[in-house]
Image (cartoon, grey):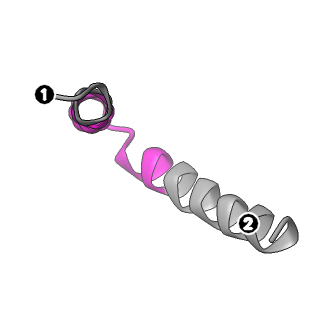
Amino acid sequence: MSINKSRGFLYKLARILGDVNAVQKGRVGRRVGRRVAGRATGRGLGKLFK
């Protein structure tokens, strides 16, 4: 297993664990909102520096 595949797996696992934690604490809406805002920011920056 290459280091890139290992890293990708760990990032996916961390995201799933964060989702589970948000559900347990009842903060799913806040997490979803931050994820959407992060994606929008990333796309905007990607277009800016392209």
Q: Relative to residue 6, is residue 11 drawn left or right? A: right
Q: Of 36 and 1, which appears nearest the observer? A: 1
Q: Of 33 and 2, which appears nearest the observer? A: 2
Asked if the residue at tag 2 contacts the one at tag 1, i.e. Cβ–Cβ closer than 8 Å, the answer is: no
Q: What number is the disc on residue 1?
A: 1
The location of residue 32, given as percent across then percent down, is: 44, 54
The answer to which quarter of the image holds residue 25 is top left
Mark closer to the chain start, 1 or 2: 1
Secondary structure of the residue carrying numbered label 1: loop
Q: Main secondary structure of the magenta part?
A: helix
Answer yes or no: is residue 23 visible: no
Secondary structure of the residue carrying numbered label 2: helix
Judge depth for marks 1 and 2 and give the one in front: 1
* Extent of the magenta region: 8-32
User: Mark 2 = which residue?
Assistant: 46
The location of residue 12, given as percent across then percent down, is: 26, 39
> Measuring 31% from the left and 37% from the top, which residue is drawn there?
15
> Measuring 79% from the left and 62% from the top, which residue is drawn there?
45
Q: Is residue 33 magenta?
A: no
The location of residue 41, given as percent across then percent down, is: 71, 60
